[in-house]
């Protein structure tokens, strides 16, 4: 059984928690992670690029000059793609880049990402408690992370919180290399992107509950 230490925000140990078997054991499925990240990035593409086809370009269909006896190349009309300001051949049109992925594959991709983070000892679980009860403080968050050897100004760091931990999120968002996510927005892309992953105690319990079963 794999156990993960839980720390208080002052750096002291607050105990440990068993990691669910589905999260701790099993292979890291690289192909599945690649597909999941590719799908995530594709879904963020707006797909708004648009060019004009021949039927959409404004202009006359009249021949610019007679077919023969002018000494120039023959042309049909100025909306042709070979003319300046003419149509575009096989140009992009607005489209969706979204890709589909079965739910079971998405869940297994998340488990693989967490397994990978556990294997590289990147996950820290912190009980922030009442650290930010007086309001968000970036300097205090920087000091807390420093107790675990994390410099969020220089090292890529992911901080995962729950809905009711607004002050924790606000305290971390101004750190140069920190990404702050609500638990509901967690995706393998963010776990793979960052070298340090800090879960609030509540967020880690949610991870166990959703992906550990």
Image: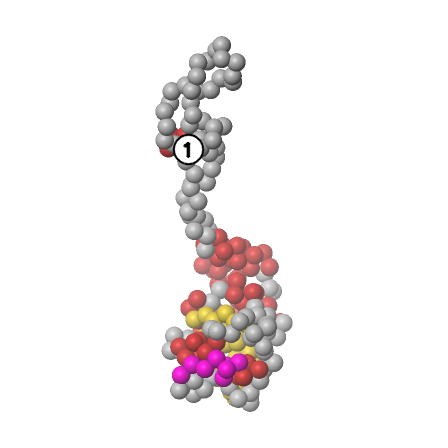
Residue drawn where x is 53% and y is 88% of the image: 10
Image coordinates of residue 181 in percent, x first then y, are 46, 70
Please, what is the dominant secondary structure of the magenta stretch? helix
Looking at the image, the residue that sits furthest to the front is: 70
What percent of the width, then of the height, locates residue 33?
Answer: 55, 59
In the displayed structure, does residue 72 sit left or right of residue 166?
right
Residue 104, compared with residue 195, is above or below; it is above
Q: Name the residue under label 1.
A: 53
Magenta-drawn segment: 135-142
Q: Does the image show residue 134? A: yes
Q: Nearer the viewer, residue 58 or 98?
A: 58
On the image, which quarter does residue 184 sit in?
A: bottom left
- Give percent across and percent down for residue 199: 50, 76
User: Is 41 rendered above or below residue 131?
Assistant: above
In the current view of this chain or complex, which residue is farthest to the top?
Answer: 69
Residue at left 60%, top 65%? 27
Q: Is mark 1 on a helix, strand or loop?
A: loop
Q: How crowded is mark 1: few (under 14 residues within 10 Å), some or many (20 or more)?
A: some
User: Residue 1 lies in what quarter of the image?
Assistant: bottom right
Q: In this view, does 186 lie to the left or right of 152?
A: left
Residue placed furthest toward the right: 120
Q: Where is residue 137 in the image (x, y as percent from the top left)?
A: 45, 82
Query: Does the magenta portion include 136?
Result: yes
On screen, residue 203 above or below 31: below
> Which residue is at a point 43% across and 71% down the rendered structure image?
182
In terms of depth relative to the viewer, which is nearer, 5 or 45?
A: 45
């Amino acid at each position: 059984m794999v156990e993960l230490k839980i720390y208080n925000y002052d750096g002291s140990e607050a105990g440990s928690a068993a990691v669910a078997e589905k999260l701790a054991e099993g292979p890291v499925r690289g192909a599945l992670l690649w597909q999941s990240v590719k799908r995530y990035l594709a879904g963020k593409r707006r797909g708004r690029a648009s060019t004009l086809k021949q039927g959409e370009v404004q202009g006359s269909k009249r021949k610019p000059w007679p077919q023969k006896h002018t000494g120039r190349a023959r042309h049909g009309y100025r909306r042709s793609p070979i003319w300046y300001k003419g149509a575009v051949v096989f140009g992009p049109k607005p489209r969706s880049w979204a890709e589909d992925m079965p739910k079971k594959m998405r869940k297994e991709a998340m488990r693989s990402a967490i397994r990978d983070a556990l294997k590289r000892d990147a996950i820290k679980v912190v009980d922030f408690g009442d650290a930010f009860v007086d309001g968000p403080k970036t300097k205090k968050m920087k000091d807390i992370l420093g107790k675990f050897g994390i410099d969020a100004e220089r090292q890529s760091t992911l901080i995962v919180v729950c809905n009711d931990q607004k002050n924790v999120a606000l305290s971390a968002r101004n750190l140069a290399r920190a990404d702050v996510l609500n638990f509901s927005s967690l995706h393998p892309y963010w776990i793979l992107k960052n070298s340090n992953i800090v879960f609030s105690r509540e967020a880690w319990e949610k991870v166990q509950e959703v992906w550990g079963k």
